[in-house]
């Protein structure tokens, strides 16, 4: 509801990031388990997740006015930025841009990842969920996208390795959303009597 209401202030207390092959069905509720195809990417840095939406507007200039007569939407970018802290068979290929990790021989205990000499398309579905207290849950799904930027990988004695990525949403087609939010947050109810604490 409009106006000041402390119960509508949200803190993303804890959450996680998941990936799946494009086309994998997302959950339809805020508490049901994600389908088997979704893989949890594990720990992220304490910076959490940064989500950015940028729309590009091109002005229509006219001879008769110094101000634009109207704007035309020419572009929409939706990106998610985060740093992964775990190194495993899911996170390293996600960061590097595809391919798989394989054991060099049966029960050898030696695993090999080969980075292709030419970039590969590595499209994924991305899922994010977080909770504020025990009652408020959010889920955010990008059904199709790809890692479009990676941070330099720092190997030092005094800090953990961080796999920093920027994931950019891609359109599935013109009839489907670029992303979907799902929540049980009562703040979005049209009822004027809604007032629920997160605790």
Image (spheres, grey):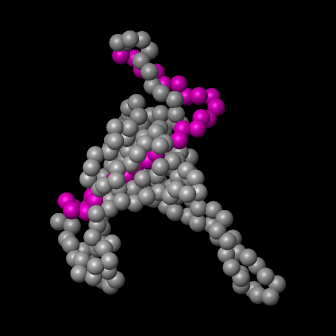
Can you give x and y, in whole percent of width and height, for residue 17 in the image? Answer: 37, 47
Can you give x and y, in whole percent of width and height, for residue 18 in the image? Answer: 38, 44
Residue 20 in which image quadrant:
top left
Q: Is residue 70 visible?
A: yes
Residue at horizontal 64 percent and vertical 31 percent from the top = 118
Residue 56 vs 157, above or below: the answer is below
Can you give x and y, in whole percent of width and height, for residue 9 in the image? Answer: 29, 72
Residue 5 vs 28, above or below: the answer is below
Q: Nearer the viewer, residue 151 or 2?
A: 2
Membership of 113 in magenta stretch? yes
Q: Is residue 156 visible?
A: no
Residue 100 vs 109, above or below: the answer is below
Residue 52 vs 41, above or below: the answer is below
Instruction: Name, please, the residue furthest toward the right.
Output: 63
- Locate residue 91 relative to residue 170 in the image: left or right: left
Instruction: Name, please, the residue furthest toward the bottom.
Output: 64
Specify the segment rendered in magenta.
109-137
- Locate residue 64 relative to residue 153 in the image: left or right: right
Residue at horizontal 47 percent and vertical 43 percent from the top = 23
Residue 71 in which image quadrant:
bottom right
Residue at horizontal 32 percent and vertical 62 percent from the top = 183
Image quadrant in which the N terminus is located: bottom left
Q: How many marks?
A: 0
Image quadrant in which the C terminus is located: bottom left
Q: Nearer the viewer, residue 40 or 192?
A: 192
Q: Nearer the viewer, residue 110 or 176?
A: 176
Can you give x and y, in whole percent of width and height, for residue 4 in the image? Answer: 30, 83
Instruction: Name, please, the residue furthest toward the front.
Output: 175
Membership of 189 in magenta stretch? no
């Amino acid at each position: 509801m409009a106006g000041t209401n402390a119960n509508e202030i949200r803190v993303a207390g804890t959450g996680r990031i998941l990936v799946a092959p494009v086309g994998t069905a997302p959950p339809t509720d805020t508490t049901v388990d994600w389908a088997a195809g979704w893989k949890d990417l594990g720990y992220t840095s304490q910076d959490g997740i940064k989500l950015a939406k940028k729309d590009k507007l091109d002005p229509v200039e006219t001879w008769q006015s110094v101000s634009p007569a109207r704007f035309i939407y020419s572009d929409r970018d939706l990106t998610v930025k985060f740093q992964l802290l775990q190194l495993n068979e899911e996170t390293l290929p996600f960061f590097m841009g595809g391919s798989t990790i394989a054991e060099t021989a049966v029960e050898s205990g030696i695993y090999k990842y080969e980075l292709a000499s030419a970039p590969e398309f590595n499209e994924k579905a991305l899922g994010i969920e977080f909770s504020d207290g025990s009652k408020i849950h959010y889920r955010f799904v990008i059904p199709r996208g790809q890692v479009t930027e990676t941070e330099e990988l720092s190997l030092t004695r005094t800090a953990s390795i961080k796999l920093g990525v920027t994931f950019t949403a891609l359109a599935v087609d013109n009839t489907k959303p670029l992303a979907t939010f799902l929540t049980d947050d009562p703040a979005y109810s049209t009822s004027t009597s809604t007032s629920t604490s997160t605790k």
